[in-house]
Image: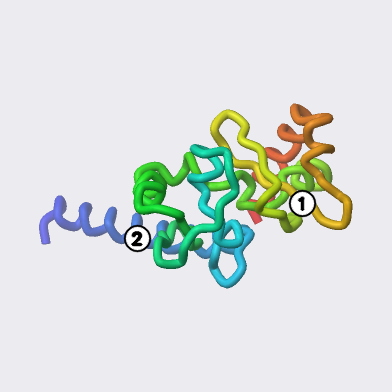
Amino acid sequence: MSTKEFTITLLVMMATTAAMAQEPIKTKHLNLKDGIAIQGYDPVAYVDNGKAIKGKPGLAVYHQGATYYFVSVEHKDLFKKNAGQYEPAYGGWCAYAMGYSGEKVSIDPATFKIINGRLYLFYNKFFNNTLKDWNKDEVNLKSKADISWGKILKQ
């Protein structure tokens, strides 16, 4: 084996190992139920249509440890082209809780906000709609949530 072949083989092995190591770490931080993200709602519908619409299991995409459902082939293809644009912030956990206490709190998939083209989800049960509290102090809560999420990803 030449030096060039050895170097290429080594780089491929390192990249493969890094990719395999990253997925389990990321997956453990995602808000999933049975591997399904956003409780089966279509992430593209939130961002592009401004609506929370349940996707179809037959139109699924597996991406970085999570399965996303879509309402159409068009939405599925848009996600595949640019998943980062459509993935929910903070792994799909409640944005308000992430900013307020740095905790992973479940969400109501119908309670959301699009900020600069990004999906943020919120807890909304038992007369506690955290989106209302988020809107009162969005700048501070978003800043704190970003910091909290960064800390969680390092765990």
Q: Residue furthest bottom?
A: 34
Q: Position of residue 143 (x, y in %)?
A: 72, 32
Among the 4 quarters of the image, the one containing residue 25: bottom right
Count of numbered marks: 2
Nearer-the-camera pick, 75 or 149: 75
Q: Earlier in the sequence, mark 1 or mark 2?
A: 2
Residue 6 in the image: x percent, y percent? 19, 57
Question: On the rendered image, what quadrant is the C terminus found in?
Answer: bottom right
Q: Is residue 131 left or right of residue 62?
A: right
Residue at 79% x, 36% y is 134
Foreground: 106 or 26?
106
Please identify, in this view, whether the residue under mark 1 or under mark 2 is nearer the observer: 1
The residue beneath circle 2 is 16
Residue under numbered circle 1 = 123
Percent position (x, y) of residue 44?
48, 45
Specify the quadrant that holds the N terminus: bottom left
Q: Residue at x 39, y 62 (%)?
A: 17
**How busy is the neighbourhood of tag 1: few (under 14 within 10 Å), some, or many (20 plus)?**
many
Q: CA distance from mark 1 to mark 2?
A: 37 Å
Extreme left residue here?
2
Q: Amino acid at mark 2?
A: Thr
Element type at marker 2?
helix
* 101 relative to 143, above or below: below
